Image (cartoon, helix red, strand yellow):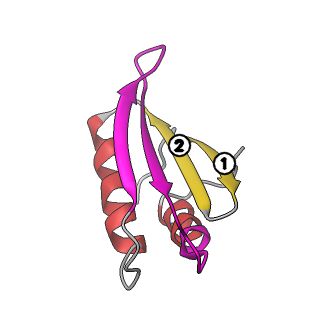
Amino acid sequence: MKQCSIDAIYHGEERYSKLSLAYTTEEEHQNIENALKEARKGVELQPQVYTTPVSNGKKVIVIEFHDDYDRNAGAVFDKMLGILDIKCCE
């Protein structure tokens, strides 16, 4: 996958995890969607996903897992970051 300029921020609490990915291009958006689809294979828990505009022409896609008793979200997020080749997440 091509290098991109996606910024990642993670937030988690007990049974709740959220990954926010800020992107600029439609190609980056599609890469994020494809990475989520690939990373979720075999995970039954459904995330809530929404997109919102932010500053400087960027948009952010937010992926939230609620009631994650088995803590599957962490593995999904780690796999996504690997697929997207994101090395740093705040």
Classify 10 Å Cα crowding around label 2: few (below 14), some (14-19), many (20 and above): many
The image position of residue 71, as x and y in percent, is 61, 75
Q: Nearer the viewer, residue 23 or 62?
A: 62
- Residue pointed to by mark 2: 20
Residue 58 picture location, percent across and down: 43, 24
Q: Which residue does the image show at 64% across and 49% down from the upper left?
A: 10
Q: Which residue is mark 1?
A: 11
Q: Quadrant of the C terminus?
A: top right
Quadrant (top left, top right, bottom left, bottom right) of the N terminus: bottom left
Residue nearest the observer in this picture, 5 or 29: 29
Q: Amino acid at mark 1?
A: His
Residue 72 higher or lower than 86, as above or below: below
Q: Determine the CA span between mark 2 and mark 1.
A: 8 Å
Vertical placement of residue 63 versus 26, above or below = below
Up-down: is 61 above or below 30? above
Mark 2 is on which residue type?
A: Ser
Identify the secondary structure beneath mark 1. strand
Q: Which residues are magenta?
A: 47-75
Q: Is residue 8 left or right of residue 66?
A: right
| Residue 25 spot, x, y in % from top left | 33, 33
For residue 44, which numbered disc appears in the image?
Answer: none
